[in-house]
Amino acid sequence: MKKYKALLTLILAVMTVLSLLPVSSAQAERSVPALPTANGGAALTPADPPMDAMTSATLTAAPASGEQVVLYYDAARAALSLNTRGSGLDATTATVNNSVSISVKTAEAALLTVETDGTFYRFASDSGYLCGKDGVLLLSGDAADSQWVSEQCDDGFYLKNDGRYLRYADGGFAMGSEPSAVTFYAVRPHTHDYQAVETIAATCFADGHAIYRCARCGDTYTKILPLNSNNCPSKTLLDVDRNQWYHKAIDFAVTNGYMKGTEQTAFEPNFTMTRAMLVTALYRVAGTPDVTAKHPFSDLQADWYYDAVAWAYENGIVNGTTPTTFSPEEPVSREQLATILYRYAEAAPAKQDKLSVFPDCDRVSHYAEEAMNWAVNEGVINGSLENGALYLRPNGNATRAEIAQMLMNYLEK
């Protein structure tokens, strides 16, 4: 029994001595730091998830310039490079946490992925494994020399093999004794968690779209929403015929807040536009600026147009019908509308005479000739079709639908 006790004591003593000996460099390297990540990417670590087999992820790099690109091997030049799309590669890109992940489709270049077995990391492509042997960087079919460890830096990790670091300088990679200015990080494959971040509804006349972004990696895609009448801006205005020429113009005016319904469910498209209605629409187009100037008009009775008339008078857009009256409820003729728009636009006279082609051009008042010619040249007024001919109808009253159309013609040019 004493013999066995002595043997046990000797074994324990030897184990104690061994535990105090320094760890060899080979043993120390096997304690691999976890691959840190930048910008929220998922780290490749033995514990995330537990790795019973090789796991891969895209390897990206951040050069000193801050541009993040992908590491790839160009087999045609036998060179390792950093690259982004647009440099001769047939590749597709996806934004991943402000990095650019490239999937190379050509036979001449291969994307390098990072693999781990929970102890060392290696970098592989269809062309072989990235190796650092005797201080030389090469791509080899032998995985034995492709064991890399990571060394953490501020926002990612450096790659170390054979006691040297993977470096990037002068457009190429090499092995060096100091860490590179290029930091790397790995982005693990994941299931996208897309959420809508912007939605523009479709209308009767235009498609809409929805932009979705992955909350995990930042990848985005756009979904087109086909045009339909579900979101028609004038659908609550029951007297707006969707099959009439004015439909799009009224939608435009209502959507932008330039014109409103005369009632909650009515627009009255064929109702004659009044002087008060017109200056109010232009006042809204101008962004409803503050009004400080006084006006000489004694017949402004309603609050809804008061500031608009004062603004239009202050800016020389309208005059009174007399020195002291504005006549807010008086109808607006087409030539008066052209004159008011012309003043609002502060436009120069049109060089080409386009009035003379209209049969009723001689009915245009002298004061309105320049404005009407400008309006026709600019496509604001196109004429009214009567018995196969286009007429200006300069003295005809403008309807609310016509005003909406002229506003759209002018503002969308």
Image (spheres, rainbow, N blue to C red):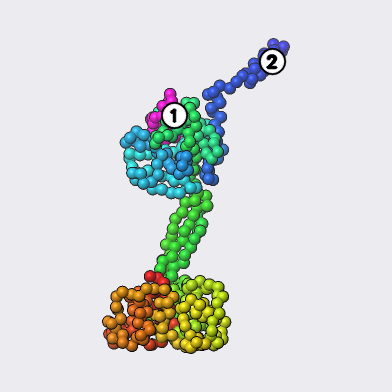
Question: What residue lies at 41% left-to-right and 72% top-to-bottom?
Answer: 411
In this view, the residue in front, 305 or 214, is 305
Q: Secondary structure at mark 1?
A: strand
Question: As shown in the figure, which amino acid type bears the numbered disc 1?
Answer: Met
Q: Quadrant of the N terminus?
A: top right
Pointer 1 or 2: first along the chain? 2
Question: What residue lies at 53% left-to-right and 45% top-to-bottom?
Answer: 39
Quarter occupied by residue 5: top right
Residue highlighted by disc 1: 175
In this view, the residue in front, 90 or 87, is 87
- Please tell me whether residue 7 is drawn above or below residue 353 in the rendered image: above
Provide the residue span drawn in magenta. 123-141
Residue highlighted by disc 2: 9
Question: What residue lies at 69% left-to-right and 12% top-to-bottom?
Answer: 6
Q: Position of residue 288 (x, y in %)?
A: 52, 73
Q: What predominant SS class does the magenta segment belong to?
A: strand
Q: Position of residue 114 (x, y in %)?
A: 46, 37
Q: Return the mark for residue 153.
A: none
Q: Is residue 384 left or right of residue 39?
A: left
Q: Position of residue 262 (x, y in %)?
A: 50, 83
Q: Is residue 6 left or right of residue 86?
A: right
Quarter occupied by residue 17: top right
Q: Is residue 180 magenta?
A: no
Q: Is residue 354 visible?
A: yes
- Please tell me whether residue 385 is drawn above or below residue 171 in the rendered image: below
Q: Is residue 269 visible?
A: no
- Please tell me whether residue 166 is drawn above or below residue 190 in the rendered image: above
